[in-house]
Image (cartoon, rainbow, N blue to C red):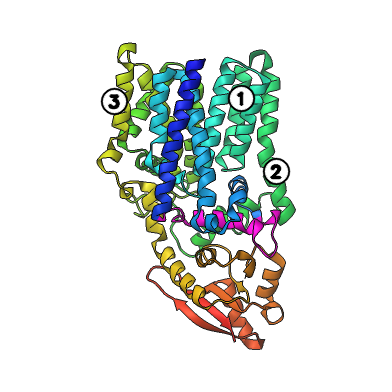
Amino acid sequence: MASRRFETLTAVLLLVLASAASLTWGLREGYLLYYGDATAHVNIARRIVDSRTPGYAQIGTVWLPLPHLLMLPLVGDDGMWRTGLAGGIPAALFYVAGGAFFFAGLRRVLGAAGAAAGAAAFALNPNLLYLQAIPMTEAIFAGCLGALFYFTVRFGREPSLKTAAAAGVAALAGTLTRYEGWFLIPFVTVYLLAAGRRRRWGAALLFGAIASAGPLYWLAHNFWFYGDPLEFYRGPWSAKAIYQRALDSGMAPYPGDGDWRAAAHYYLAAARLCAGWPLAVLGAAGAFVALWRRNWWPVALFALPPVFYIWSLHSGGTPIFVPHLWPHSWYNTRYGLSALPLLALGVAALAAVIPQRLRAAGAAGLLGAVLLPWLLRPAPEAWICWKESQVNSEQRRAWTREAADYLKRHYKGGGVIHAFGDLTGIFLEAGIPLRETLHEGNTLEYYAAIGRPDLFLDEEWAVAISGDPVATAILRARRSGPEYECVKMIALKDAPVIEIYRRK
């Protein structure tokens, strides 16, 4: 027992060092807010405490609430908000916790050498290290999944209501972070029924009650604020609605939409890019070894998120674009990281079957092979998740910087109306508090100003994307007032036209 605790504490220390190094590097290089979603996450958290209408209602819909709630103790600080640290720190903490739980779970199933190799293959993946340093949800969910893995493995060997409740709390946190967490609930419940022996029904009911509280709460939240419990799924800002608008405008269907083979092909391509070829090959082979050793549950649990994403690709709800497949771009490649725990488990299983006298050296050799692509090319350009964030944000960062510089020089107060979304990054970079802006989160005041600008539009400034509701309201206001002058227009190649207006 003492040896196991020492090994786990050592793993925690190494995880902390890796996390801190990655976070420090990302902060120094200015990478924490490259992803548009990362900027949006910190701004959603910020508007809960910094808004004309602050409070719980600012959580919104579509994106689940836990990541934003975790940022609340930090996001009120201007420096934490503007750099993205307010979101990077919670993600890093969950990465450390998830890595420790993953190691402890592997230690119970496959022994010390296998656990060390598998946990290192998981934790030292540069794509995960990048995502755990920024305000995104993948590392937070990985922490929840690691805890769920540990407690379900422990339950399989020592069934108890306490362990089932702990697994329920881990699953609950996952359901409030990403929607694949919802997908896990019935499968884990069935596992507890199968593994629980005399405590099976009580354990399964307890787990199900705790874990299901997350989805039930989110359905109730959407019904209370939007009148539709499925607003996150079919509302105007849902992935489904955005996709339909794109189809209506003439865009070709997403690869994999209605095609299982293409869905699997695109997902596996993203997983291979995120993991690297050696881990993809060794991890896949090792997963079969784990099945041969009758480690059914770990393989099944870690296979569920990839199954969820392939299903989502097939349903058209989730696109994944990779640079070597049509349309030869980067989009949602990070979803391939959901295969990382399964592949890392496979590496652990391979290490565990090496003869005892060679096991430590064999585990080190496996880890060296897994890390080889990243050691041969130790640059972020080789990390598909960083590359995705860099390529897709280049134009956005350029017009955000230009607009923010203009407002820094000229804005002296008077309020700004804008559509919440990418434009909010302008105020983050300019250091303008969100309480000085008017957006969709300020529901009644915003929609009154948009609907009847002649009566309710009082802001001195407006920032718009050409043709959006704010730009349209400004044009309509010219008929009967108030009148605005376009004082700055930013038009960059392959980017939306940004318009800054000032009231005459």
Residue to which mark 1 is pinned? 190
Q: Residues within 10 Å of mark 3 (few under 14, many from 20)?
A: some
| C-alpha distance separating marks 3 and 1 | 37 Å
Question: Which one is in front in this view, the residue at disc 2 or the one at disc 1?
Answer: 2
Q: Nearer the viewer, mark 3 or mark 1?
A: 3
Asked if the magenta segment contains residue 47, the reply would be yes
Label at residue 365: 3
- Based on the picture, tell me whether residue 270 belongs to the magenta stretch: no
Q: Read off the residue under disc 2.
A: 217
Which numbered disc, 2 or 1, marks the residue that appears first in the sequence? 1
Residue in the picture at 43% in, 52% down = 27
Mark 3 and mark 1 in contact? Answer it, CB < 8 Å.
no
- Residue 114 can be seen in this image: yes
Q: Is residue 191 left or right of residue 305?
A: right
Whole-percent x, y for residue 453 in the image: 67, 79
The amino acid on which the numbered mark 1 sits, given as a three-letter code, is Val
| Mark 1 burial class by Cα count in 10 Å: few <14, some 14-19, many 20+ | some
- Provide the residue span drawn in magenta: 30-58
Q: Nearer the viewer, residue 291 or 375?
A: 375
Circle nearer the N terminus (3, 1)? 1
